[in-house]
Image: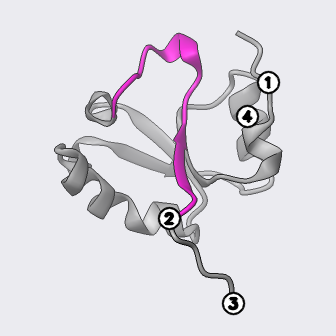
Amino acid sequence: MIGYEQAPASIFVLRKSGITSPQQLAGKTLGAAANDSTFKLFPIFAKFAGFDANAVTVKTIDPALREGLLVNGKSMPLLHRCSTRCCRSKPKE
């Protein structure tokens, strides 16, 4: 079992999306893996960030495809745990 001092949960967006704060996610569609802990914790995050989680549509996507879809600009913002693989990706903007 691995313990974290801070959860590695993240929301990834492309710079060109214009999203710079959590509140700007309201009205948007996010992509997430159905069993990902970040997806399950999103309502709690939204409450603490000051927006209604019900104002965001979350679509499930295949976990193997999520980073590639975002980096290639073919996906909406992603709910995901931060990992070396996705944090080092360089999006094409």
Instruction: Answer whether labels 3 and 4 touch (C-beta < 8 Å).
Output: no
Examine the rendered structure and indicate whether residue 84 appears above or below residue 30.
Answer: below
Residues at discs 1 and 4 in contact (Cβ within 8 Å): no
Three-letter amino acid code at the position of disc 2: Gln
3D distance between C-alphas at marks 2 and 3 = 15 Å
Q: CA distance from mark 3 to mark 4?
A: 30 Å
Residue beneath disc 4: 69
Q: Which residue is mark 3?
A: 1
Of marks 3 and 1, the one in the foreground: 3
Query: Mark 1 or mark 4: which comes first in sequence?
Result: 4
Screen quadrant of the C terminus: top right
Mark seen at residue 6: 2
Residue 74 in percent (x, y) is at 68, 25
Q: Is residue 80 magenta?
A: no
- Label 4: how many Cα within 10 Å (few below 14, some 14–19, many 20+): some
Of the numbered discs 3 and 1, the one sitting upstream in the chain is 3
Q: Nearer the viewer, mark 3 or mark 4?
A: 3
Identity, as a three-letter code, of the amino acid under mark 1: Lys
Residue at 36 percent across and 31 percent down: it is 28
Residue on which the image places disc 1: 90
- Quarter the N terminus occupies: bottom right
